[in-house]
Amino acid sequence: MASVMHHLVSRGLEAVQQHQENPEQTFGPFKVPTWGFVLVGLTTILYLAVSLCIRYTYGELIGTLAMIEDPSTTMIIRTSEADAPLPSAVESEKEPEKGPLLEQEILLVKSKPITASFRTTIAHLRAHGGILSHYRGAHVLAAYYLAYHLMCSFLFRVVPQTLVYRAIITVVASTILCRLNATWTHIVISEPSEKRFFQRVPARTSFRKLAGPTFLNAVAKQLVFVGLVEMFSVFGLQQYVADLSKLGELTDAERLNVWFHSFIVLTTAVLGAVFVIIPTHVALRRVQASLLPEEDESIVPFDRTFNGKVVPEILGGSGRVGMAEAWKSFDWNGRVRLFMVYAKVAAIQVVLFTLFTLALAAEVRLILGDQLDKMVIAATRGAR
């Protein structure tokens, strides 16, 4: 990672020096002014920043809250007068007059989940944690990914550069950093605390409770990823990704075969995410939530005992829920709610990318001007 950053910085300094010496640079067949590079660069940075914020707030933060939320149930007792039978003439003479009979009706009302709506969730977070609460824990997640990538970058240099070895390294790095990952979960799902984030890192003894679920979740991700890469290679699709013009050289039957193989890979990716990655990810988050210290109040309702599956250590239990129980206790309403969160995030990202593409096309037209028109005319004549 350090070498990549050094390369990017060096290239950036060279580009700045070149732009200062010559306000117009040649980019392929085009002459692009300096302000054109700046405009496209700023637009790209803005898009990446907004996309990252959307992914963090709605995908990571609200997604995690949806995984552990257990809507609270309220008991309502209604008392009303019951119609008493009319007393007979003998009973009315012997017994004194009694008051009316009371009848009680008990209703159990399950409140609407907070994470059922983005607007409701954001309002709830701001009411409890302030205006920037939808970015809570971002610094911890940044620290986790920084440590993760530094560890992977170091280990990649000492192992053979194969797909399998790289997958093993990512699993090892994720497992080693499981306590830091759990720290982010605890900060996200709990009320604001005055403690520093390093003061909220779970104790060392929690490593054995977190390492297993983290390992299984990382293995699930890598199995799906490696499987997709191998399918991509077996079907020979990488050549068309590198050069889309090769699709035009194929016959209709060959092109149809390529699209069919692409559909198989895409379907496999979706099925792997839905039935392998997401269940293990949900189970991991719920295991992490079960280790939330008792003095920390959750910011959304959730059952700390997971339907009685969690037994405290002082009573001889493990103090955490197992992965199987963590997933089974996540009811169908919660699963549907979580998939709706992911679907909304995907839709927002598609709209954002579409707007970015349109803005970029307009900027390219503005920057190149007549040069773009001449290229289009030349390409049209060449096609004829």
Image: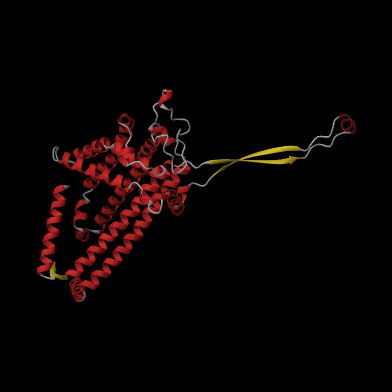
Q: How many marks?
A: 0
Q: Position of residue 41 (x, y in %)?
A: 22, 63
Against 294, residue 7 (above or below) is below
Q: Position of residue 225 (x, y in %)?
A: 27, 43
* Quadrant in which the C terminus is drawn: bottom left
Q: Position of residue 377 (x, y in %)?
A: 20, 75
Residue located farthest toward the top when viewing the structure as drawn: 316
Residue at image coords 36%, 48%: 136
Is residue 378 rendered to the left or right of residue 253? left
- Give the camera-side residue of 363 and 318: 318
Is residue 294 rendered to the left or right of residue 104? left
Against 237, residue 160 (above or below) is above
In this orientation, does residue 220 appear?
no
- Which corner quadrant of the image does residue 66 belong to? top left
Q: What kind of colouring is applied to the model shown?
A: secondary structure
Q: Position of residue 327 (x, y in %)?
A: 41, 36
Residue at image coords 32%, 41%: 197
In this orientation, does residue 123 appear?
yes
Residue at image coords 32%, 45%: 268
Residue at image coords 40%, 26%: 313
